[in-house]
């Protein structure tokens, strides 16, 4: 598995114009939110065989600073998002989700930090 950097960028799917390969194009006037993480970015990836074929599931849990009130509204439970991570060795983008097939995010609030849980399912391997 790739070694991922401990910074992630998130964008609600409505802010993203398109995703092509490892490039995320934002709509005019929008940017992705940058979140340094408290723990290593180590997603769990599993595959399972279903009636329609193999399904790959991706889940990432990371600790971050407390979200602002505006961010809490933006990333309300199960909000559709596009996740942009970085390969620590090459610096290349690793993008999870598209505007038409986004990842889903939930926020687990803590006392001093929050935890983001990002989940995605695909018919093709994600990493």
Image: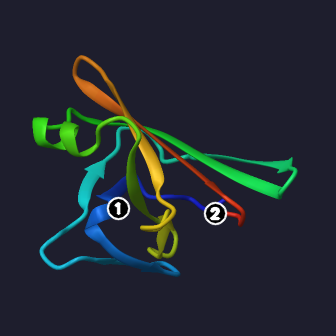
Which residue is under mark 2? 126
For mark 2, give the secondary structure: loop
51 or 64: which is nearer to us?
Answer: 51
> Could you tell me which residue is drawn at 47 percent across and 58 percent down?
102
Q: How is the image coloured?
A: rainbow
- Quarter holding the N terminus? bottom right
Q: Position of residue 73 (x, y in %)?
A: 19, 39
Please say if 40 is above or below 103. Answer: above
Q: Position of residue 118 (x, y in %)?
A: 47, 44
Q: Is residue 87 visible?
A: no
> Could you tell me which residue is drawn at 28 percent across and 50 percent down?
35
Which residue is under mark 1? 13
118 or 41: which is nearer to us?
Answer: 118
For mark 1, give the secondary structure: helix
The quadrant holding residue 68 is: top left
Q: Compare marks 2 and 1 and give the one earlier in the sequence.
A: 1
Please say if 47 is above or below 65. Answer: below
- Quarter holding the C terminus? bottom right
Marks 2 and 1, how far apart at CA? 18 Å
> Could you tell me which residue is drawn at 41 percent across and 40 percent down?
78
Please say if 69 is above or below 30. Answer: above
């Amino acid at each position: 598995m790739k070694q991922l950097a401990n910074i992630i960028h998130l964008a609600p799917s409505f802010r993203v114009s398109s995703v092509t390969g490892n490039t995320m194009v934002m709509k005019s006037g929008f940017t992705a939110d940058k979140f340094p993480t408290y723990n290593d970015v180590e997603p769990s990836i599993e595959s399972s065989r279903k009636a329609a074929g193999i399904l790959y599931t991706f889940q990432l849990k990371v600790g971050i600073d407390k979200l602002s009130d505006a961010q809490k509204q933006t990333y309300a439970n199960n909000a559709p998002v596009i996740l942009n991570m970085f390969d620590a060795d090459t610096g290349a983008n690793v993008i999870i989700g598209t505007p038409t097939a986004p990842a889903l995010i939930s926020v687990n609030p803590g006392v001093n930090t929050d935890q983001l849980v990002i989940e995605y399912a695909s018919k093709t391997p994600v990493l």
